[in-house]
Image: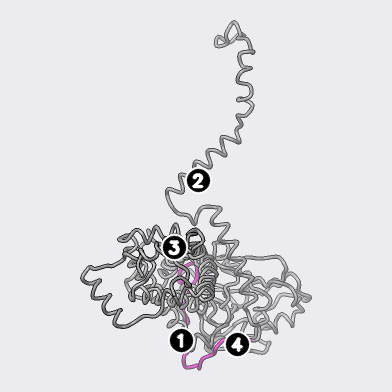
Amino acid sequence: MKSPFRPVRVPDPAILDDHRRLIARLERRGFIRGGLSLGALAMLTGCDVSSEPGVDKALRLVSSWNDRVQGALFDPTHLAPTYPESMILRPPKFNAYYDITQVKPVSAQDWKLELAGLIADKRPWTAERLATLPETEMVIKHICVEGWDYIGGWSGPTLRSFLERVGADLRAKYVAFKTADDYPSSIDMATALHPQTLLATKYGGAPLADPFGFPLRLRMATKLGYKNPKWITAIEVTNRYPGGYWESLGFNWFGGM
Amino acid sequence: MNSNSTDTAAQSSGNSSELPRLHPWPVRLMHWTNATAMIIMILSGWGIYDDYVIIPGLHFSETFRLGPWAAPSLLWHFAGMWLLAVNGCCYVIYGLLTGRLRERMLPIRLAELVQTVRDTLHFKIAHEDLTVYNAVQKLLYIVVILAGISQVLTGLLIWKPIQFSAAVALLGGFQAVRLEHFLGMGVIVGFLIVHVALSLLVPQTLWAMLTGGPRLPTRKELS
């Protein structure tokens, strides 16, 4: 059926010839691109330069350069100052991306430490077996990226002794952690092998309390607080950059002190 | 020496375009690079400070902070530090090698210092000759250069308190260094307020820092 909207006589297509070049240049992509730049310009007037994708990308690029600088500055033999046991703060300070009332305790019976990546013996560990490893104690300063600090006393096997025991490839770049509170984290191998890097099971001589990572957490004397995951459930040795919770939100990955 | 003698010296040499300007281009470049770096460091520093304040009740308004929360502020601070430190090193090395620092900042005489303060309090701000700094200016510039150096050093210690644990202990511990870094910011912000206010009061100084200012007689001609 003939549409009532269609003209009876179609105009000569030659009238388009004058504009053919212009029409050929019209592209949907061009409109989108132009629209986006206009939007970006409008955002600038809102004036938050940090959230500009280009600025954020450049800042994060400098941050990964800073990771390399920190790796070079890190002295694997330099020990952090230690303090007398009398200075230990009891209980330690709680800090996480959620409130202390939202801590979900981990049961020691059900808990297992899974191993993955460049590790020879990947059999999971129980809390009992972990307790058979020789223990190291350290009373060190915890410094938060926010600026506060306190002195804490931690004990447990060194991460180095554990990695050696399970036959991890100690030439790999990263050691990554998974936790029960969904707080993935990762560190460089040099720090993992530092004598003041512990798989802590105790605080102030007693087993870790629930809010502080029972049954197993990482404690490093050479990195900022947010680099120390609690309630560890899995350890992976890898050469692929694993990132972490706060790191994906813009905190520096190395986080060394 | 006043501006007239400068002009005369320039004319007498017959080839004024070869005479150095008050602020040669490296100084101007480093000055404005430093201004940018300082603003980045101060505003992002305020964003970092706010997570754990040093003076209870003292917060910096979000309007002035660089970065909507701590992570972006930290990213800015730890990027700006390279600009500040590298540019600052260039400035000090340049100033020492060319003799500019010694020529402009020294000597400071106590009597002159007292006289300038007295004049300033009577609103007698003499600034006909841009090429000579009075005693107060000299002192302020020395103080702010030292504060800048101190900020870089205390900043390095806050960044790496374990690697440089001996230096941190020497300065009184981590929180003491944090306080020193904060006070250093206060000194620099205080300087900035006076510096910007005076340069707006005597706009030729601002113009000189943009274009180079009057040409100077060479040291030979002065002697």
User: Where is mark 3, residue-wise?
Assistant: B12
Q: Residues within 10 Å of mark 2 (few under 14, many from 20)?
A: some
Is A189 on the left or on the right of B210, as rendered? right
Task: Name the residue nearer the viewer: B121 or A12.
Answer: B121
User: Where is mark 1, residue-wise?
Assistant: B171
Residue B123: x and y, percent?
22, 68
Task: Name the residue nearer the viewer: A62 or A244.
Answer: A62
Position of the N terminus of chain B, as image quadrant, is bottom left
Residue B152: x and y, percent?
49, 75
Residue B155: x and y, percent?
49, 76
Kind of residue indicated by mark 4: Leu
User: Where is mark 4, residue-wise?
Assistant: A79
Which mark is in front, 4 or 3? Answer: 3
Q: Residues within 10 Å of mark 4 (few under 14, many from 20)?
A: some
User: Where is mark 2, residue-wise?
Assistant: A40
Above/below status of B138 relative to B67? below
> Which mark, by number, is residue A68?
none
Q: Which residues are magenta?
A: A78-100
